[in-house]
Amino acid sequence: MSRRLLIVEDDEELGAQIVARLRAAGFEPTWWKEGRRLTQDELPKVELVVLDLMLPGTYGMDMLKDLREHSEVPVLVLSARNDTADKVRALKLGADDYMTKPFWPEELVERVRARLRRPKLERSDVLEVGILRIDRARREVSVRGERVEVTRVEFDFLLALAERPGEAVTRRWLAERVLDPDRNGDERTLDVHVSRLRKKLGREAIVETVWGIGYRLAAGADR
């Protein structure tokens, strides 16, 4: 049975070549020609995604963020952007591989095969750290069983800390992870979001400032 892939590529000629090459290699590709915001229900049942970045509709990095909110499907970024900053950001957001254009189709096929040979990561939709409970699929946060209404940025920030309980996480990394630098601002903007989140969390000192570094999920989360 052919393994199903999702190809997100807006260039008609290049996309057709990629699809033809992967199909000839025995895969079953589905081709999207524009970027889309992704919910859990909208992602096709595929085993790997080949993702361009500069897409009409939704920017590839935003699609990658959406994917990682509810899926561990492997993502191979295929982009003409060859800056180190773009590569690092994509990998931090959860990409498994990054290829730059132009490229050899044979290499793309082998990278797809190599990634599919690796064990697929499995994760629970629910993350619990002490009194804090985060449901990734529902994008809900609760403290001591009481649901707390949070924004997208607040949810992503809290999730990033909860995935590293007790670790100090830099403001810069968090800003890159949870904010869109073109729309949401910088590290100071992150601080504003954190301030609002703390008020929502009430007296529970869950988010702790690590001076000179950033934030961490504090001991309060273990009470």
Image (cartoon, grey):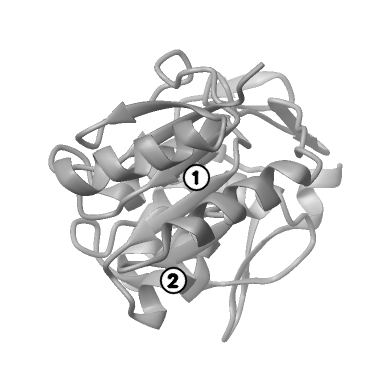
Disc assigned to residue 156: 1
The residue positioned 52% from the left and 61% from the top of the image is 107
The location of residue 170, given as percent across then percent down, is 57, 74
Residue 175 in the figure: left or right of residue 46? left
Tell which circle, 2 or 1, labels the residue nearer the N-terminal end: 2
Amino acid under label 1?
Asp
Residue on which disc 2 sits = 87
Disc assigned to residue 58: none
- Please tell me whether residue 111 is drawn above or below residue 26 in the rendered image: below
**Which of labels 2 and 1 is toward the front?**
2
The location of residue 84, given as percent across then percent down, is 41, 81
Amino acid under label 2?
Lys
The residue positioned 30% from the left and 70% from the top of the image is 186
Quadrant of the image containing the C terminus: top right
Most foreground residue, 169 or 5: 5
> As drawn, which residue projects farthest toward the bottom?
212
The location of residue 211, given as percent across then percent down, is 60, 81
Most foreground residue, 94 or 222: 94
SS for dot 2 = helix
